[in-house]
Amino acid sequence: MKALPMIAAIAMFGSVAVSCRAEDKTVNSPLEHKLTDIDGNEFDLTKLKGKVVLIVNVASECGYTPQYKGLQELYEKYEKDGFVVIGIPSNEFGRQEPGTDKEIKEFCSTKYKVTFPMMSKSVIKGNQQIPLYKSLLEATRNDKGEIQQVGWNFEKFLIGRDGRVVGRFKSGVEPTSDVLIKAIKAELDKPAK
C-alpha cells in the first residue's frame, strides 16, 4: 500500500507535536458516515463535504467541559466561512457523560448555549466503536503506522474541505488556542471543492 505524504496533523502530547499519516487505500473520508443526532434524527455527514469540520468527543462532567464555551465561540465566528463543529457525547472516559441524550441536550443548550450540531451519545473506543471513529483513527496513524486510540474527552479531529483529516488535537488543546485556530483558518482559506 502506498502511503500518502505526511498530513499536517498535530497530536499534542504535552508540548510535543506528532505528525500523523494516512494510508491511501484504508482510509475513507470520515464524511462518508451517517450518525444519529441528539434528537434521534439521521445526520448524514456527506452534507458537510466542502466544509471544514471539527469533530470532538464531549462530556458534561469532565474537567474539560468548559471547552464547550470555546467550541461555541469558534462555531459562531467561522460558521459563515464554512466551518462546523460536531459534538459527539461519549461515556468511555471516567464515565463523565452518564446522561441521556435529552439530558445532554438540556445541559449543553442551557449552560453553554450550544448551537452547533450535537450527536447522540456514542461509543468511540473499544469493540463497539462507531465507524466514524474507526475512520478518524485510521487516518491519524502515528509515524510507525500504529493506531492511537482517543485518550480522553474533548479530543479534536479537524477535517479539511477535501474530506480528509488534517489535524488531531489532544484534550488539553483549548478550542481558542492559537494552534487550533491557525489550523482551522488554513483549511478555510482553501477553496471549496
Image (tube, rainbow, N blue to C red):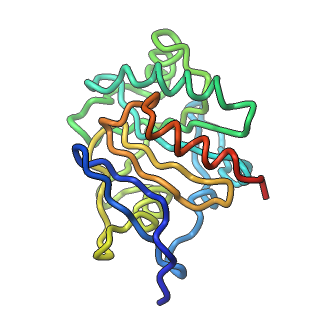
Instruction: Write down the quadrant of residue 85 in the picture.
Output: top right
Picture residue at 37% right of the left edge, 19% below the top: 66
Picture residue at 52% right of the left edge, 36% below the top: 181
Q: How many labels, in total?
A: 0
Instruction: Write down the quadrant of residue 61 in the picture.
Output: top left
| Left or right of residue 126: residue 89 | right
Q: Residue furthest bottom?
A: 1
Of residues 97 and 9, the one nearer the viewer is: 9
Above or below 177: residue 55: below
Of residues 185 and 101, the one nearer the viewer is: 185
Above or below 3: residue 89: above
Picture residue at 58% right of the left edge, 61% below the top: 164
Quadrant where the image shows the C terminus: bottom right
Above or below 155: residue 115: above
Q: Position of residue 21 (x, y in %)?
A: 43, 70
Q: Position of residue 145 (x, y in %)?
A: 33, 76
Q: Position of residue 104 (x, y in %)?
A: 44, 23
| Left or right of residue 64: residue 175 | right
